[in-house]
Image: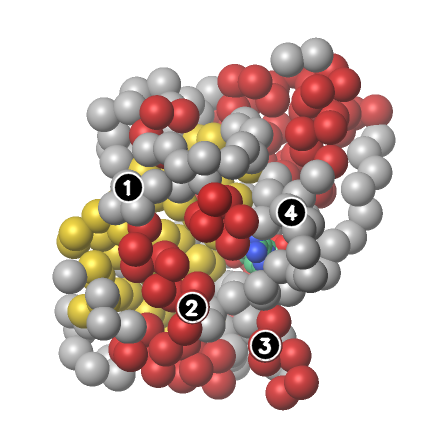
Amino acid sequence: MTEEQILEAIGKVEVREGIQRTIKSYALRSNVMDDAQRRIVLDNYERYCTTFSEGLIDPRTLFKDPAKPVIVEIGFGMGSSTQVIAKERDGFNYLCLEVYLVGFVKLLRDVSKLELDNIRLMRFNAVDVLQRMIADSSVQGFHIFFPDPWPKKKHHKRRLIQPDFVSLLSRKLVKGGYIYMVTDWREYAEWSMEIFSQEPLLSDPYGKGVYAPPVPWRPTTKFEKKGLEKDYEISELWFERV
Ligand SMILES: C[S@@+](CC[C@H](N)C(=O)[O-])C[C@H]1O[C@@H](n2cnc3c(N)ncnc32)[C@H](O)[C@@H]1O
């Protein structure tokens, strides 16, 4: 790819067609990079990033070792958990989706330093990627860590976890695949528990309405530690495709 093509690819983060995308789950911040950030992107894009394209693919084909099952992470933020998990739980490939440019470049820098070939980053709206690019029954798991809780009632429609989106996630999973969501916002946990429980393609291995125990391989992030200091309770939700 030429430098222009790379910059164009990361500059556009959603499909704008017809009226509006279904869920406005994020507020877009700046699209401007300084020279150092631009260099990181240009030097590493082709090895570690994937460009959004229309047409369904098996995501395993994006990776150096296509034998490993694919986990899709939605909204990795600064990517601090992402890289720890990908390094330690290296039997999987990780397709990591985020629209926040600063976080995207930060994870790209870290991944290139660590040479983590089981990570591919995409700066694109997860809803579009799943609807338009990822084939059904092709994903082993979804990681959704601390999605924006949109706490005000008038913003609840911006929450990522909605019945249609959960149904979309479920269709993308292989049988036995999982959705793992973590939140520190109790009311969002309850909201999500209700929606996941009602999805016919999902089962709840821990019992109806029961939160999952923490998994040993998910590190505690800085953001999470701050929440814990304020006495926020962490809720873990784990569902599996029937
Ligand atoms: C509260 S942050 C949490 C970040 C990280 N997972 C963590 O635990 O620190 C939620 C992130 O999800 C991203 N996000 C929200 N909706 C998204 C979407 N539809 N596609 C991709 N990323 C999204 C936001 O840009 C934001 O960075």
Mark 1 or mark 2, which is nearer the start of the sequence?
1
Q: Is residue 100 left or right of residue 188?
A: right
Which dot marks residue 157? Answer: 3
Mark 2 or mark 3, which is nearer the start of the sequence?
3
Which dot marks residue 164? Answer: 2
- The residue carrying mark 1 is 138
The location of residue 34, given as percent across then percent down, is 84, 31
Indicate the secondary structure of the residue bearing disc 3.
helix
Q: Is residue 62 left or right of residue 231?
A: left
The location of residue 24, given as percent across then percent down, is 64, 64
Mark 2 or mark 4, which is nearer the start of the sequence?
4
> Are the residues at dot 3 and dot 4 in contact (C-beta closer than 8 Å)?
no
Callout 4 amino acid: Glu
Q: Is residue 208 left or right of residue 62?
A: left
Q: Nearer the viewer, residue 1 or 78?
A: 1
- The residue carrying mark 4 is 14
Q: Is residue 118 left or right of residue 120?
A: left
Mark 4 or mark 3, which is nearer the start of the sequence?
4
Report the number of numbered marks. Answer: 4
